[in-house]
Image: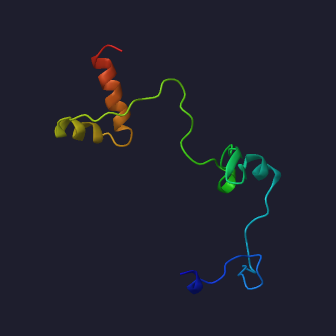
Amino acid sequence: MTENKPNTDPSSSDGWLDPADDAPEWTDEMFEMAAYIVGGKVIRPATGYLGPNGMVRGRPPVRGVAKQQVTLRIDPDVIAKFREGGPGWQARMNEALRKAVGL
């Protein structure tokens, strides 16, 4: 099977290398955040991700008590009433439930 595959080893004389490689040069910050792997063993895991414009990917860290996701069956007219208020209807529903139980 390997006889049909081209040699992709970059150290070989017939290996393909992109002459117009536009990958940015690594900064000191990128090296500090990178994972160190030797022989397939993680020596130090990565400490984060630096995305475009210095933004960090993913949700922000949870402050205080994290909310718990549940599956709940609610009448369609109740959901429609909360959705009429636009974005944030889940938070308004949470607040209504908190008031109903005296929190």
Please state the horizontal and vertical placement of residue 24, each as a whole percent of the image.
75, 65
Q: 59 or 13: nearer the eye?
A: 13
Residue at position x 80%, y 55% in the image: 27
Looking at this view, name the residue that lies furthest to the right.
28
Residue 25, given in percent of the width and then of the height, sits at: 79, 63
User: Residue 90's x, y, as percent?
Assistant: 35, 36
Which quarter of the rendering shows the C terminus? top left
Against 41, is 26 above or below?
Answer: below
The quadrant where residue 19 appears: bottom right
Question: Which residue does the image show at 53% across and 31% down from the upper left?
Answer: 62
Is 12 on the left-hand or right-hand side of 41? Answer: right
Relative side of 74 to 90, left or right: left
Q: Indicate left or right for 30 with 98 as reference.
A: right
| Residue 98 in the image: above or below residue 3 | above
Q: Residue sitting at 78 percent across and 46 percent down?
A: 32
Q: State the image coordinates of residue 50 (x, y, percent, origin top left).
A: 68, 51
Q: Residue at x 59, y 85 (%)?
A: 3
29, 102: nearer the viewer: 29
Number of labels in the image equals 0
Nearer to me, 42 or 103: 42
Q: How is the image coloured?
A: rainbow
Residue 60 quadrant: top right
